Image: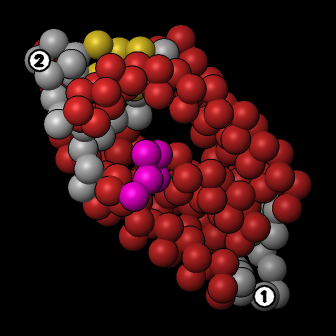
């Protein structure tokens, strides 16, 4: 994989994340304006730091390679399609923060019909896959483990925040 294609791939990811952050900010502001409540905001900067460090490590450490890891690239492409499906399924409720709106029903569209946290599962796969594409297994392992630890805490916080709404949904 040439340096051009490496930076094109990383540029795509940076652009994608920027667009997603803008969309998430807009959605969070709208949910808060409707009476939503943010939960777990104190750990949000850790996610920003983790993802920024992950991208920085990829940009700084990536080197051209002889081989193109087609299978990993295909997996990454599928993950990106799943990302779009996940975001579209939540629509105006998708944010990068935990914002709960007490009167809003829990979304059960798309992958949320089968999984409670498909976005977190996707990110848990994506964090190590991209460094593996770039032949950076240590980066894949390190950031994969850091992300898993942070997501474990976040899922606990989010589940606690959504518990009252899940009880209401279960009784319907």
Along the line of sight, which residue is nearer the eye, 128 or 103?
A: 103
Q: Nearer the viewer, mark 2 or mark 1?
A: 2
Could you tell whether 32 is left or right of 147 in the image?
A: left
Badge 2 element: loop
Return the residue at label 2: 34
Instruction: Using the numbered discs, state the Cα–Cα distance from disc 2 to disc 1 in whole angstroms.
Output: 51 Å
Q: Give the side of residue 5 with respect to residue 61, left or right.
A: left
Q: Is residue 49 visible?
A: no
Task: Identify which residue, 158 or 135, lies in the foreground.
Answer: 158
168 shown above or below 54: above
Main SS class of the magenta portion in the image:
loop
Say if 121 sits above or below 149 in the image. below
What residue lies at 50% left-to-right and 67% top-to-bottom?
79
Of 69 and 167, which appears nearest the observer?
A: 167
Q: Residues within 10 Å of mark 2 (few under 14, many from 20)?
A: few
Viewport quadrant of the C terminus: top left
Q: Position of residue 101 (x, y in %)?
A: 22, 22
Q: Is residue 56 above or below residue 47?
A: below
Q: Is residue 155 left or right of residue 137?
A: left
Q: Earlier in the sequence, mark 2 or mark 1?
A: 2
Judging by the rendered image, the residue that carries numbered circle 1 is 67
Labelled disc at residue 51: none
Residue drawn at x 63%, y 59% is 125
Which residues fall within the magenta stretch? 114-118
Query: For residue 32: magenta?
Result: no
* Residue 140 x %, y %: 78, 56
What's the residue at 70%, 41% (across, down)? 148
Residue drawn at x 65%, y 33% is: 152
Q: Is disc 2 in contact with disc 1, using a CB cutoff of under 8 Å?
A: no
Image quadrant containing the N terminus: bottom right
């Amino acid at each position: 994989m040439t340096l051009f294609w490496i930076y094109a791939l990383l540029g795509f990811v940076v652009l994608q994340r920027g667009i997603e952050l803008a969309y998430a900010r807009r959605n969070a502001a709208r949910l808060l304006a409707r009476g939503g409540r943010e939960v777990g905001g104190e750990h949000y900067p850790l996610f920003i730091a983790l993802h920024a460090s992950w991208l920085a490590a990829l940009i700084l450490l990536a080197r051209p390679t002889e081989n193109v890891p087609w299978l990993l690239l295909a997996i990454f492409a599928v993950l990106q399609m799943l990302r779009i499906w996940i975001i579209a399924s939540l629509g105006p409720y998708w944010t990068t923060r935990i914002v709960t709106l007490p009167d809003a029903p829990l979304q059960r569209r798309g992958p949320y019909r089968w999984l409670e946290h498909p976005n977190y599962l996707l990110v848990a796969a994506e964090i190590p896959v991209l460094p593996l594409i770039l032949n950076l297994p240590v980066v894949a392992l390190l950031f994969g483990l850091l992300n898993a630890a942070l997501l474990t805490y976040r899922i606990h916080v989010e589940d606690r925040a959504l518990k009252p709404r899940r009880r209401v949904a279960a009784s319907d």
